[in-house]
């Protein structure tokens, strides 16, 4: 049986020019093929920082303290959410300014300007931002309770006398007196700088019909509108969405280190001659971004109780059975 001759002009589909117009053959251009290796998604450097701190720093310390945590993931997710929300809000504000400069979404009739409503969108971002921040603080509170510390009062709306009384009561339970003093100074400073104001506004957002002032618009020499965004907490929208997520990150991390430092201090090693200690170490190998410019990672090690000598930071131990210290 003779084979049927194929038309010489016939070109297989995968050998034809790609319809995308690149000029390459279809099989070497847009034809879907199986990947030879894993798919790596490049995240924002700030997300890399958060991931590095949670996974390589805090989880490692918890492992050496033989503690399992159920609420660390909630804190991690809350931090990621507030950064993503802030990035989206900043982009929307930037796009709104750009569109107005280009005359997009704006109409002028005589001396009257008509502009697309951005106030409702900005109110949504602000409201959701404070709610997301509250979720971060709740995750931090639950994690602290999980390892044996009650810090819920730090984020309440009590008067200064009750607050300081409860703070002193917490500090008095610290065996590491120096660490306790540093923790108190840190809390008072952060509450004065931004935490107190955030908590006040968060309560307003959650329990009332919260609305920010309307955006005001000026006209430039080219007869284009320039938005003047309202101040929130005395900050511009740009500063709020850019600075507050970073504040949340460093605040949460530092509180966790203070509390874990106290737990480490109570841990005995080598027949009680050594105690646990957490020390900052410069680490060049980790992926750092704008959130950890100092490239510092806290690591668990041990310290001689008599001489104060600190062992190598590569110290680690195996726990026969993880324990949860929640009271």
Image (cartoon, rainbow, N blue to C red):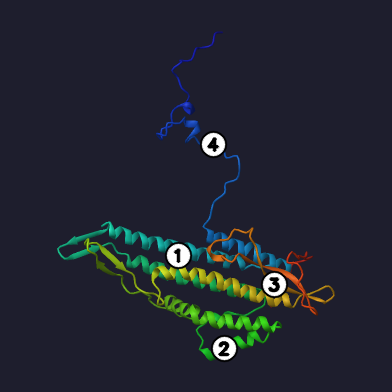
Whether residue 326 is visible, yes or no, is no
Dot 4 or dot 1: first in sequence order is 4
Q: Position of residue 177 (x, y in %)?
A: 69, 84
Disc assigned to residue 278:
3
- Per the image, label 3 sits on a secondary structure element best described as strand
Above or below, 172 relative to 277: below
Pointer 4: what residue?
Answer: 33
Dot 2 or dot 4: first in sequence order is 4
Dot 2 or dot 1: first in sequence order is 1
Residue drawn at x 66%, y 80% as measured from the top left:
179
Give the alpha-carbon distance from disc 2 to disc 1, as whole Å: 32 Å
Looking at the image, is mark 3 or mark 4 nearer the viewer? 3
Residue drawn at x 64%, y 84% as measured from the top left:
181
Looking at the image, is mark 1 or mark 3 nearer the viewer? 3
- Per the image, label 1 sits on a secondary structure element best described as helix
Above or below, 96 relative to 134: above
Pointer 2: what residue?
Answer: 164
- Per the image, label 2 sits on a secondary structure element best described as helix
Give the alpha-carbon distance from disc 2 to disc 4, as whole Å: 64 Å
Task: Give the quadrant of the C terminus.
Answer: bottom right
Other-residue count near label 4 (Cα within 10 Å), few / some / many at <14 / 14–19 / ≥20: few
Give the alpha-carbon distance from disc 3 to disc 2, as whole Å: 27 Å
Instruction: Say which quarter of the image contains residue 226.
Output: bottom left
Residue drawn at x 55%, y 83% as measured from the top left:
188
Looking at the image, is mark 3 or mark 2 nearer the viewer? 3
Pointer 1: what residue?
Answer: 86
């Amino acid at each position: 049986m003779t084979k049927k001759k194929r038309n010489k002009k016939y070109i297989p589909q995968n050998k034809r020019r790609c319809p995308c117009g690149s000029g390459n053959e279809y099989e070497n251009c847009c034809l879907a093929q199986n990947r030879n290796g894993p798919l790596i998604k490049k995240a924002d450097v700030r997300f890399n920082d958060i991931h590095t701190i949670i996974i390589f720093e805090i989880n490692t310390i918890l492992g050496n303290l033989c503690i399992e945590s159920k609420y660390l993931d909630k804190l991690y997710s809350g931090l990621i959410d507030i950064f993503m929300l802030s990035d989206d809000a900043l982009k929307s504000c930037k796009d709104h300014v750009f569109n107005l400069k280009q005359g997009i979404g704006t109409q002028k009739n005589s001396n009257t300007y008509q502009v697309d409503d951005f106030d409702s969108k900005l109110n949504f971002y602000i409201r959701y931002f404070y709610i997301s921040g509250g979720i971060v603080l709740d995750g931090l509170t639950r994690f602290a309770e999980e390892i044996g510390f009650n810090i819920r009062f730090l984020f309440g709306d009590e008067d200064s006398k009750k607050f300081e009384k409860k703070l002193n009561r917490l500090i008095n339970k610290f065996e590491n007196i120096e660490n306790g003093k540093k923790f108190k100074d840190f809390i008072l400073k952060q509450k004065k700088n931004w935490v107190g104001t955030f908590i006040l506004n968060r309560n307003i957002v959650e329990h009332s019909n919260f609305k920010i002032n309307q955006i005001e618009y000026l006209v430039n020499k080219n007869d284009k509108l320039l938005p003047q965004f309202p101040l929130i907490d005395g900050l511009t929208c740009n500063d709020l969405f850019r600075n507050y997520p970073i504040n949340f990150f460093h605040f949460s991390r530092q509180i966790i280190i203070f509390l874990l430092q106290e737990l480490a201090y109570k841990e005995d090693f080598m027949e009680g001659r050594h105690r646990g200690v957490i020390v900052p170490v410069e680490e060049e190998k980790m992926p750092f971004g704008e959130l950890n410019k100092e490239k510092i990672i806290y690591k668990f090690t041990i310290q001689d109780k008599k001489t104060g000598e600190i062992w190598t930071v590569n110290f680690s131990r195996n726990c026969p059975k993880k324990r949860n210290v929640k009271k």
